[in-house]
Amino acid sequence: MMDFIAKVAPMLLDGAWITLKITFISVSLAALLALPMSILRIQSSRVYRWPVKLFISFFRGTPLIAQLFLLYYGSGQFRPWLMDMGLWTFFRDPVNCAMLVFTLNSLAYQTEILRGAIQSVDAGEIEAAKSMGMHNSLLYKHIVLPLAYRIAFPALGNECILMLKGGAVASVITVMDLMGQTRRAFSQTFDISTYFLAAAMYLIIATLFVMAWRQAERYLYRHQIQRTPGAKSVTAAAT
């Protein structure tokens, strides 16, 4: 058993690094774009709201693997135009295609999470800020967004975990992430333990992330945690 682990573990660790890199870059880029997208989503004008709504509906309503196939294999149909624009070197790389699809998919979910959080901010606090003469930019910067991100924080953590696990589909377009390396190792050893080892690695990564996210959540909600004996943290109460 130890010989098997010594043979397979380096391959899986290499794949785990690719998985973490793709997940981190995709979720981070989506987080940067989610804020302006969520603000457009709640605008009263249909010119701004409907394009964002259609984008969200497509990426939330279709399977992630279908989106991946559509971009990776579909981009080949436009190879001459992509080459003319200097973009073919990007789209021919499966890792780049995976990161782009995962970014867009996560963006759709994060936009809806933030949209709901922004609309959940207490109207009384907004009215109080307006009564003091605070204009919209300051209102969003100092009142709406800090409260919205606190509301959205647990759901954003769940989205990161889902993207980490859902990203395993990248292996179907030859990305050598954790699942891709697992399939490669299994094709060489035909030992089902390879998949158990990969599952354990996914579990360890997810558990460490959850622990770190909960620590950040406790810090973010520290003013709401009751200091009485037997009181639960906000995270524990939510779970």
Image (tube, grey):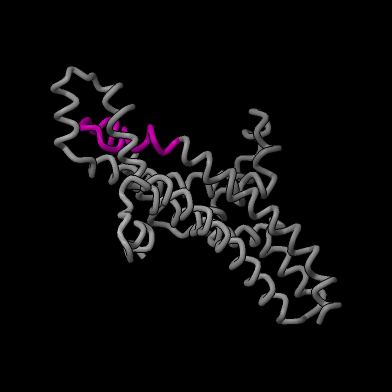
Majority SS type along the magenta span: helix
229 over 56 or under it: above or below? below
- Give the magenta-colored segment's residue range: 33-50
Say whether residue 147 is visible: yes
Q: Residue at x 16, y 20 (%)?
A: 132
Q: Does the magenta segment cover residue 70? A: no
- Please name the residue shown 23% across and 44% down the image: 120
Image quadrant holding the N terminus, namely bottom right
Whether residue 163 is situated above or below residue 118 in the rendered picture: below
How many tags in the picture?
Answer: 0
Instruction: Give the side of residue 99 with respect to residue 178, left or right.
Output: left
Can you name the residue that lies furthest to the front here?
Answer: 229
Of 47 and 148, the residue lying toward us: 148
Residue 44 horizontal side relative to residue 208, left or right: left
Residue 72 position in % (x across, y down) = 61, 50
Residue drawn at x 55%, y 63% as measured from the top left: 207
List x then y, in percent, for residue 154.
Answer: 39, 53
Examine the image and state in which quarter residue 25 appears.
top right
Q: Does residue 143 lie above or below 206 as drawn?
A: above
Whether the magenta-drawn stretch holds residue 39 is answered as yes
Q: Residue at x 49, y 59 (%)?
A: 162
Determine whether, in the image, residue 108 is placed left or right of residue 143.
Answer: right
User: In the depicted view, which residue is nearer to us: 80 or 42?
Assistant: 42
Residue 174 seen in the figure: no
In this rendered view, identify the residue nearer to me: 207 or 21. Answer: 207
Q: Relative to 193, is 14 above or below? A: above
The quarter in which the C terminus is drawn is bottom left
Question: Horizontal and vertical percent for residue 60?
Answer: 39, 54
Image quadrant in which you'd find residue 84: top right
The front one of 209 and 116 is 209
